[in-house]
Image (cartoon, grey):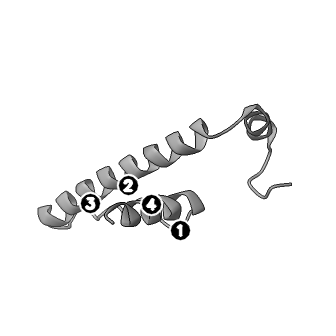
Amino acid sequence: MEFKPQIEQLQDIVKGNKGPPEVPDVKEPDAVKLKYEHDYKIFNKGEALAQLILVSSMNDTNIDLTATCKSNSGE
């Protein structure tokens, strides 16, 4: 099924296992810069979708906890 790789990519973004691509040096060839731009767009789409899924699945209690949380450690 073709959705499985997309779901795994979203899980990696949500868990923090996958971040944005590394910004290339200004001296890099144009092909490297184009690949970075392409990969960055893909990452941004995945991050936006992950945020949408997370926010739309939150109930009022989750929203209150998120709004008042002072760290990401769960304490």
Q: Quick one: SS at disc 4? A: helix
Instruction: State which quadrant residue 23 falls in.
Output: bottom left
In the image, taking residue 28 as reference, residue 15 lies left or right, namely right
**Picture coordinates of residue 74, whole percent (x, y):** 81, 55
Residue 17 higher or lower than 37, as above or below: below
**Picture coordinates of residue 16, whole percent (x, y):** 56, 63
**Picture coordinates of residue 5, whole percent (x, y):** 37, 66
Q: Residue furthest left?
A: 30
| Residue annotated with mark 4 | 7
Sequence-first tag of 4 and 3: 4
| Residue annotated with mark 3 | 36
Tag 4: residue type? Ile
| Residue found 29% across the figure and 64% down from its top | 24
Tag 1: residue type? Asn
| Residue annotated with mark 1 | 17
Residue 56 higher or lower than 7, as above or below: above
**Picture coordinates of residue 7, whole percent (x, y):** 44, 60
Foreground disc of the pair 4, 3: 4
Nearer-the-camera pick, 43 or 55: 55
| Residue found 24% across the figure and 55% down from its top | 38
Residue 61 higher or lower than 14, as above or below: above
Number of other residues with Cα within 10 Å of mark 1, as a class: few under 14, some 14 to 19, many 20 or more: few
In the image, taking residue 42 as reference, residue 32 lies left or right, namely left
Q: Quick one: SS at disc 3? A: helix
Q: Quick one: SS at disc 1? A: loop
Tag 3: residue type? Tyr
Marks 4 and 2, Cα distance to the nearest angstrom? 13 Å
| Residue annotated with mark 2 | 43
